[in-house]
Amino acid sequence: MSIHASTTRPEDPMQYGHFDDAAREYVITRPDTPRSWSNYLGSRLYGGIITQGAGGYSFYKSGGTGRVLRFRFNGVPQDEPGRFVYLRDDADGDFWSASWQPVGKPLKGRDGDDADAAGNPTQASSVRHGLGYSIFHSSYRGIDSEATFFIPQGQAFEYWSVKVTNTTAKPRKVSLFSYAELSNEWNYRQDLENLQYSQYVVVCRMEDGMIHRTNSTRTHTSELWFGMAGADVAGFDTDRDAFLGSYRTQAAPLAVERGHCSGSEATGDNACTSLQATLELAPGETRQVIYMMGVGAPDAAWADADDVAVRPGREIMAEYGTPEAVERELEAIREEWRSFLAPLQVATPDEQMNSMINVWHAYQTHMTFNWSRGVSLIEAGDRDGLGYRDTVQDMLAVIHAIPDAVRERLDMILTGQTEEGGAMPLVKPLTHRPGSEKTPTLEQYRSDDPLWLPITVANFVYETGDVAYLDTVLPYADHGEATVFEHLKQAIQFSLGHLGNNGLVQGLQADWNDCLQFGTTGESMFSTFLMANGVRIIAELAEQTGREDDAAWARGVLEDLEVVLENAWDGGWYIRGISSTGAKLGSEALDEGKIYLEPNVWAAISQTVPEARAIGAMDSVYERLSTEHGVALCAPAHTKEVPGVGLSLLVFPVGHKENGGIFCHANSWTIVAEGILGRGDRAYEYYRGFLPAKYNDQAELHQVEPYVYCQFTHGPESPRFGQARNPWLTGTASWSYVGVTQYILGVRPELSGLRIDPCLPEGWGGYQVTRRFRGMDLTINVVNVDGLATGVSSVTIDGVEVASTEDEGKRGALVPVEALGDGAVLTVTMG
Ligand code: GLC
């Protein structure tokens, strides 16, 4: 940030942008956001992050081991370096950047002031974060620019396309300088930490108008190219320090200030890509300069470590380096996202719900599916692998949209389960070897990991109708193989084989809550409910697919559990767990950690306790944990050890993260739990409680992006109550999407059809859901003239009544798949 920039304008409302649903964009009108607001680019082949300040990075296949653009984590500001384009008025040397940062000119205020209080000219700057692209608009002293950044579909290169317009009546001469700092190594840690090596491996040359960066690393040589179309190269720098000058920052690079690059070529140290163009602009004239950067060499084909061939950069530039190609490729990205989001769209009385479900929430579920917990400004890339439990849950929200990709991931993750039924905590897809992975020790297992499988596998089968999937034989991680159905049973057998003294499931290294270690002797109530839920699902699957013995077995397990579950009732809610010495967590008798969210929501979700218990538990959650920003994970937060329980959450001050923070992932389950209980007002109140869009005009309080969910919000015991952290890659994306679409709007797949079971807040007159189901595009119009919370009295398809409203005492209507057809319009009347 430059010294000119003002970041606090207390007279402004706390709003930095707005949703533009028609364009599927979030428009940031004030780029001086409280924290960096990011967007994602590209695919799993070549991806990147870009913030509202054009900060961020790119990578080839992996953020951890395929780093292209360098990023310095925890920098000041939060998001540099990045993809910068400087503009310089050659008449007087004044310069700025196409994004507000890194030069950081005074920002034009809402009243359109042309100069700040000190008389400095102001820059109007806005950012459109779209799906897979970001566009930066700038207007400064009569020069407008529009810089568009994206990675074309299926390609391993990125576009930075810049249009510059002279809006004045005089001819203007403007120089453009690109700037990106390159990673010296594929491996980001080697690049950032092992400097005695990584600083001496890089060579960056100018070759016939294109920049060519090579290195000879210990793993695999990485090559990159960078070129420019639409203008002649007027100068270049490939040595970072020559471009910036010593003791300068990206806010004022020497080359830009001076007005010309120095023609430097890096041999060792650090490389950069700066190409200079000089534009003579007549009044009203627009010029477009297209920068392109990709993996490989300018003039030779290149193969990556997996022998995947990449074409020479010059060939790619010849084909793609035109304004028409940029337009076409950008439209292809937009079209691709339209097709990913089309399978589920809604029109409800809640505009923010619509913006989220139709665009941003769905987009976030895809990004979480793509990047797991490996790529963000917070997640450095270290977690290159797929966390078992996260991955299984991340699939839930995208099955209807990308069933084939889910199937592939599901197959892979099932092979991360070991023969004894536990699961590898982390599966590394690039190096995973089913059948020959090492079996974790009991101490290393997480008690919940494989217990997520029944939910996701069942939902995959319900969504696709692919019952045969249950018979597919897949290897275990260590040895042996079994059908998918057997994999599910084995997950339960693993838990049943590791019960504690009280008949609850041993907590092991952790359960869902990474910060609670009950170990091999203590017991977790969360995992016990998750197991019970898994057994219930297996029983249902077995009954519906003619596996009578399995169904009987599962029903028997549930019966045996009844007493155990009842014993875990603390009087007003369920305990969180018990240590080997009998010390409880989540009990009224304690001073700290009296009540925890997780076991209580899962009591309701699992449907394995009497309804009165589930209601009692959820009422206690409401009374004891609910706040205006969401539901705290536990209360009061912990300051002291609990004998026999590893409370690694003590590393967090009270109210942070797992120690009494509002952990959004677990908040999502409150929506599902209340949806199952049929309490529409509560389900909706919980949904709204941590809805990102709700914070659009409270951005200075919430601080992170109002268009995506974050991992947690500081809880009521934190001095930062209401501030949110760790946006984007979180299990919240998946579960809250399931919560709102399947348990409030109530459209969820079952084996024999689509259940429509609204659970609404008071006074909603109706809504529409368009949804793809087994290849059919359906329109579902829910009519609720009496403003009821739940209950369906009739369903008609194209005017003809089709479904019985009651089946097996379940709520809502199950519309049989045979009654549905592509293009069918369903009218669901509540009553
Ligand atoms: C993080 C982890 C997730 C865990 C949660 C609660 O979100 O990615 O695996 O369940 O924290 O500890």
Image: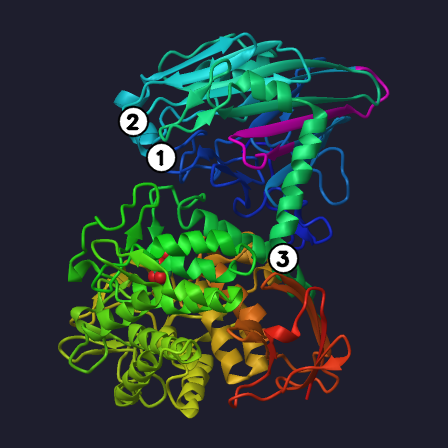
Q: Dividing the image into 4 quarters, which one contains the C terminus?
A: bottom right
Q: Is residue 519 left or right of residue 624?
A: left
**Element type at marker 3?**
loop
Residue pictured at 50% horizontal, 81% vertical: 676
Q: Is residue 112 left or right of residue 583?
A: right
How far separated are the C-alphas under marks 3 and 1?
A: 36 Å
Q: Which amino acid, mark 1?
A: Thr
Q: Quadrant of residue 596?
A: bottom left
How far separated are the C-alphas under marks 3 and 2?
A: 45 Å
The disc placed on residue 696 is 3
Upstream in sequence: badge 3 or badge 2:
2
Q: Position of residue 557 (x, y in %)?
A: 28, 83
Q: Which amino acid, mark 3?
A: Asn
Residue pictured at 19% horizontal, 83% vertical: 502
Judge by depth and name the residue closer to the eye, 654 or 429: 429
In this view, 542 is above or below 476: below
**Label 2 Cα neighbours within 10 Å, binned few <14 / some 14-19 / many ≥20:** few
Q: Quadrant of ligand 1?
A: bottom left
Q: Which residues are magenta?
A: 148-171
Residue farthest to the right? Answer: 169
Residue farthest to the left? Answer: 581
Upstream in sequence: badge 1 or badge 2:
1
Q: Position of residue 458 (x, y in %)?
A: 43, 69
- CB of mark 3 within 8 Å of CB of mark 2? no
Upstream in sequence: badge 3 or badge 1:
1
- CB of mark 1 within 8 Å of CB of mark 2? yes
